């Protein structure tokens, strides 16, 4: 009977579904070499980057949209997408007084103050609005200790050597269909460089906002953490509620040198479409980190709650000896959302270690798949992996799948895999209700307990925020 | 006049079994007044646990006839959480594990849900720490108990003690204890009985569902009922329990 109540579960109205009315410079729809060149021209690309784009575009034309995942969506018409849309006025501002007040208001509404007076203390923000970075806080103070935190457009102009050296080295164009597309048309993103022996004193973050209907967002993030350094970075994503699907195809590359550590956290709350599955973001993202140096560490934490379709596998290439890769994930799907997400841990160096903790929650008629690869190459002697995949079903019409792939190339390594699927049980709910706790609070209590191992990896107050977000997403009309 | 806490009249309830209703309670009557301890005994499958779940509002059971008044109000109109917040407590026979949910936070959330429902001020975490320490000492439990996840990996005895701890925290007007004594060793049984005796007052009431006389050595019942075939077959004082222990349920036939 509680099941029937649970079927009534509906996502609360999406809080970030508003659109900002702003004059934008928008390219015509469609994808062609001409558009790629126009983006390149718009961005004042140096020659090497223009070539980077053209190569990517050539690659893209040779490839096919892959169909191996558990997600189903109508064929994407790449000629029906706007590849560049930017608020009129120039790009990333040194002085925030130049930023359109309408945009400042948008970020205030999103709860991300970006003005100097109001900026958050312990966290620096790069704000990406459609195709461009519109603001970037704390930049100057960070530069004083050698930390570069800026939009990738600015980095291409100011630090071309670093970009040339690292861009595309972790995720090459040829990696997949959407990474090739991204290579051709990416228009902005975030660049971070942490110099040797530096612990970045504050959290660095990017807020991604899609605003224009019909436009795609193709951003590129590159984080390089040099020897003996540390950085914690987090990203948040929101979009207006449109009836049509929108494509978000990002590429994220992380590089960690000797003894370096990168902690990368995502709270993804793109518009998920309505309860009938109309609209919503296609979130097809390639995220990969390379533990290049010995004793380096890359840790991914993701809380995926939005998007109509999520298709992503933040991965680690454990090349340096003793390097460590971690993946902590909560993926929540409701209504008709679909998620096929997980990770790849590629062990190359000796004594490399990886940990995977994945929690999938499916409500409504949604479908949630964990897909993961643990690959231990012959060179990775004494490698260790631990994987834990738990799925929770809410109601009788949702689905959860777990698809682990394990390849072990030597006999000194160990791989552990644990998996469980549970239903949010009537007995658990009744137990909490009998203690005076309302159905809604009972559900969110059970869910946050289920996700605890992942939420505790999120920096500071974001754990609480993630908890709240989960409750909001499952909030219902029961009671 | 002593207040009537709960008054159950001609209660019929069924459960769905493979799509077909099976009636378990078939016209049960019971009245419990403030200050009283009632024990319900009876053979397996007679409907004892069903009665406790129906009172608490478990969604698997449907009441088809009869009435239940709780403090003069229609209990059947209330959702399970509202019943709990109005003062009805059920110590479960098999308390469920809820992974990842901290025991202490859960206890505070539960306590504050009731406060909120009654329009009273919620207790902050620091005051609650003092409050809970006093309760936990009564049950001779270690405070590390509070840092664990709700019932997760608890032994049978620990789960039962945790139920009694919740009862002490929530201080209900009616505590229904469904086979709380089952699976307890003699030391744990004494501690649980101490907890019940601490809680018991002239303002509240206890309904003990049990198979064994031994708990009743520690918690003296005012009434002992035999539940069989979905109705109360016989009512007596504590000597009835002793008699049943000796000769089985045959005497009540």
Image: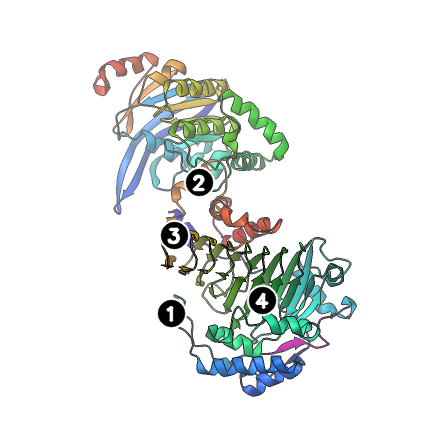
- The residue that label 4 is drawn on is A239
Element carrying mark 3: loop
**Residue A68 marker:** 1
Which label's residue is closer to the chain start, 3 or 1?
Answer: 1
**Which SS type dominates the magenta stretch?**
loop
- Density class for disc 2 (Cα within 10 Å; few <14, some 14-19, many ≥20) is many
Measured Cα–Cα span from mark 2 to mark 3: 37 Å
- The residue that label 2 is drawn on is B98
Horizontal side of residue B181 vs A440, given as left or right: left
Given this view, does label 2 or label 1 mark the residue nearer the observer? 1
Query: Residue under mark 3: which chain is it in?
Result: A
- Density class for disc 3 (Cα within 10 Å; few <14, some 14-19, many ≥20) is few
The percent position of residue B227, horizontal first and vertical second, equals 29, 25
The percent position of residue B4, horizontal first and vertical second, equals 46, 23
What's the residue at 67%, 55% (across, down)? A197
Q: Nearer the viewer, residue A463 or A381?
A: A381
Give the residues in magenta.
Answer: A83-93
Query: Residue under mark 1: which chain is it in?
Result: A
- The residue that label 3 is drawn on is A412
The percent position of residue A94, horizontal first and vertical second, equals 76, 69
Element carrying mark 4: loop
Indicate the quadrant where residue A241 lies.
bottom right
Given this view, does label 4 or label 3 mark the residue nearer the observer? 3
């Amino acid at each position: 009977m509680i099941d029937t109540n649970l079927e009534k579960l509906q996502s609360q109205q999406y809080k970030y579904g508003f659109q900002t009315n702003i004059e934008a410079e928008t390219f015509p729809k469609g994808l062609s070499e001409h558009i790629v060149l126009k983006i390149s021209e718009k961005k004042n690309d140096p020659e090497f980057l223009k070539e980077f784009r053209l190569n990517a575009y050539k690659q893209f034309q040779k490839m096919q949209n892959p169909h191996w995942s558990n997600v189903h969506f109508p064929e994407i018409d790449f000629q029906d997408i706007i590849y560049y849309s930017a608020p009129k006025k120039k790009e990333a501002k040194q002085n925030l007084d130049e930023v359109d007040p309408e945009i400042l208001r948008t970020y205030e509404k999103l709860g991300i103050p970006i003005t100097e007076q109001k900026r958050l203390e312990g966290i620096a923000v790069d704000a990406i609005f459609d195709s461009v970075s519109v603001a970037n806080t704390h930049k100057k103070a960070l530069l004083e200790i050698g930390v570069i935190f800026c939009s990738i457009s600015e980095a291409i102009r100011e630090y071309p050597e670093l970009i040339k050296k690292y861009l595309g080295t972790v995720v090459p164009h040829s990696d997949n269909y959407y990474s090739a597309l991204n290579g051709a048309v990416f228009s902005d993103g975030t660049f971070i460089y942490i110099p040797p022996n530096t612990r970045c004193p504050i959290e660095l973050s990017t807020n991604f906002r899609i605003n224009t209907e019909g436009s795609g967002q193709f951003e590129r993030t590159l984080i390089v953490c040099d020897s003996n350094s540390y950085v914690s970075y987090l990203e948040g994503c929101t979009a207006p509620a449109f009836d049509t699907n929108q494509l978000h195809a990002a590429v994220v590359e992380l590089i960690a040198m000797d003894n370096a550590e990168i902690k990368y956290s995502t709270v993804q709350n793109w518009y998920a479409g309505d309860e009938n599955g109309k609209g919503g973001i296609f979130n097809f993202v390639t995220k990969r980190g390379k533990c290049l140096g010995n004793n380096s560490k890359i840790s991914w934490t993701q809380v995926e709650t939005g998007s109509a379709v999520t298709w992503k596998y933040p991965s680690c290439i454990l090349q340096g000896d003793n390097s460590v890769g971690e993946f902590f994930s909560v993926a929540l799907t409701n209504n008709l959302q679909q998620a096929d997400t997980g990770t790849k841990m590629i062990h190359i160096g000796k004594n490399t270690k990886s940990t995977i903790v994945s929690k999938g929650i499916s409500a409504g008629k949604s479908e949630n798949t964990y897909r993961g690869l643990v690959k231990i190459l012959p060179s990775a002697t004494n490698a260790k992996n631990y994987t834990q995949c738990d799925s929770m079903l809410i109601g009788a019409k949702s689905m959860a799948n777990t698809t682990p792939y394990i390849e072990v190339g030597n006999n000194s390594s160990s791989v552990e895999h644990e998996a469980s699927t549970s239903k949010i049980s009537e007995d658990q709910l009744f137990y909490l209700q009998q203690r005076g706790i309302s159905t809604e609070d009972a559900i969110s209590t059970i869910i946050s307990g289920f996700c605890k191992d992942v939420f505790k990896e999120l920096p500071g107050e974001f754990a609480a925020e993630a908890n709240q977000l989960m409750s909001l997403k499952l909030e219902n009309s029961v009671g | 006049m002593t207040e009537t806490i709960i008054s159950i009249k001609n209660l019929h309830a069924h459960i769905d079994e493979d799509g077909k209703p099976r009636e378990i309670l078939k016209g049960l009557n019971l009245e419990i007044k403030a200050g009283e301890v009632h024990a319900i005994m009876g053979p397996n499958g007679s409907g004892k646990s069903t009665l406790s779940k129906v009172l608490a509002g478990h969604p698997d059971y449907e009441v088809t006839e009869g009435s239940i008044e709780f403090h003069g109000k229609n209990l059947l109109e209330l959702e399970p959480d509202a019943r709990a917040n109005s003062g009805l407590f059920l110590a479960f026979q098999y308390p469920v594990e809820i992974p990842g949910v901290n025991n202490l936070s859960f206890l505070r959330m539960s306590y504050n849900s009731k406060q909120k429902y009654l329009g009273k001020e919620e207790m902050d975490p620091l005051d609650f720490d003092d409050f809970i320490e006093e309760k936990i000492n009564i049950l001779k439990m270690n405070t590390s108990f509070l840092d664990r996840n709700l019932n997760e990996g608890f032994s049978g005895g620990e789960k039962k003690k945790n139920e009694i701890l919740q009862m002490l925290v929530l201080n209900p007007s009616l505590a229904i204890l469904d086979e709380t004594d089952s699976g307890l060793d003699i030391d744990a049984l004494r501690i649980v009985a101490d907890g019940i005796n601490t809680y018991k007052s002239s303002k509240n009431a206890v309904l003990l569902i049990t198979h064994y006389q031994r708990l009743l050595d520690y918690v003296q019942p005012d009434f002992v009922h035999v539940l069989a075939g979905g109705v109360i077959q016989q009512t007596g004082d504590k000597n009835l329990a002793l008699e049943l222990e000796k000769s089985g349920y045959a005497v009540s036939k």
